[in-house]
Image: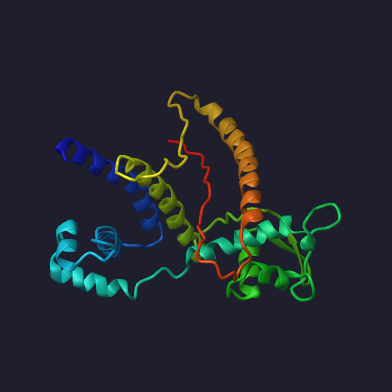
Amino acid sequence: MSMQIRDALLGACRHFMVPVARFLMQNGVTFKEFSAMAKLAFVEVASDDYGIRGRPTNVSRTAVLTGLTRKEVKRVRDEMKVVSSSVDAASLNRPAEILTIWNEDARFLNSDGSPRILSMEGQGQFRDLLRVVGGDVPPGAMLTELVRAECVAEVSEDKFKCLKRDFNPSGIDVFQATRFGECLHDLADTLQFNLAMGEEGQPQRRFEYRVWNDRIPRKLVRGFEKLTRKTGYEALKDYDKWLAGNQVPPGTADKNLARCGVGIYFFED
């Protein structure tokens, strides 16, 4: 690798790390804690992606790839066995799944196709809705999160109304912290996949495009943002319907499953 490319890569790293550093510092995460997680990620990738004939990479080669000592690699590998996210991607997605089913499944709709007001208990009520999605999150905790995110409102005692079909809460909590990582991971994974297309045996590029212009009068930016909200949201509803209509029922014993989706986002400097 030429020094010019290495400098460009490090410059790109610093550029995308600025909003990450801002997010972490806003929520009390120190550089020392971040550095420890970065070290785990380097060892994980070196161990899993650079082995021979499907086996994990040995300690010595992992040390060469990461620039760490063999002793440090062994320590980090031991730490990887016990360090994990407190909320996995499936748990993060369950509130969104609940809202989709509440808006799509005939069992939870009125005659005009709008989401029914649900009680916690009873046939065809919220607990049954949660059973359709699956998982082990208690119904009360899930309902509290949906209300906090302003996706659901309690209209009277034990009567809950669905306000939205998308889960996008504000404020930092365990779900939001995990969502931050999931969103960045999905975009970065697609970019890395496409940039590796030159490698032998790589399949077709994934869809990833942007449009932007750096000469837009500021007074027009809010109008463009409004346009993206409307058209982007309508597109996502179509994608969401397809995903909901093609998923296998929760609990199905099928190992040939994949996680896929689409993200649309507005950006402004």
Where residue 116 sits, quadrant-wise, is bottom right
Pinpoint residue 265: horizontal percent, then vertical percent.
51, 42
Q: Which residue: 24% across, 70% down? A: 76
Colouring rule applied to residues: rainbow
Where residue 108 sits, quadrant-wise, is bottom right
175 left or right, relative to 107: left
Q: In which quarter of the image is the C terminus?
A: top left
Residue 124 appears in the rendering: yes
Which residue is more in the foreground, 189 or 155? 189
Q: Which residue: 61% across, 73% down? A: 141
Compared to 204, does 69 lie above or below?
A: below
Compared to 222, does 72 lie above or below?
A: below
Residue 151 appears in the rendering: no
Pinpoint residue 159: horizontal percent, then vertical percent.
78, 68
Which residue is more in the foreground, 22 or 243? 243
Q: Which residue: 68% across, 53% down? A: 164
How many numbered discs?
0
164 left or right, relative to 266: right
Which residue is more in the foreground, 24 or 183? 183
Which residue is more in the foreground, 217 or 236? 236
Pinpoint residue 193: horizontal percent, then vertical percent.
37, 46
Pinpoint residue 10: horizontal percent, then vertical percent.
23, 44
Q: In which quarter of the image is the N terminus?
A: top left
71 left or right, relative to 241: left
Q: Which residue: 83% across, 58% down? A: 110
Q: Residue furthest right?
A: 111
77 left or right, relative to 242: left
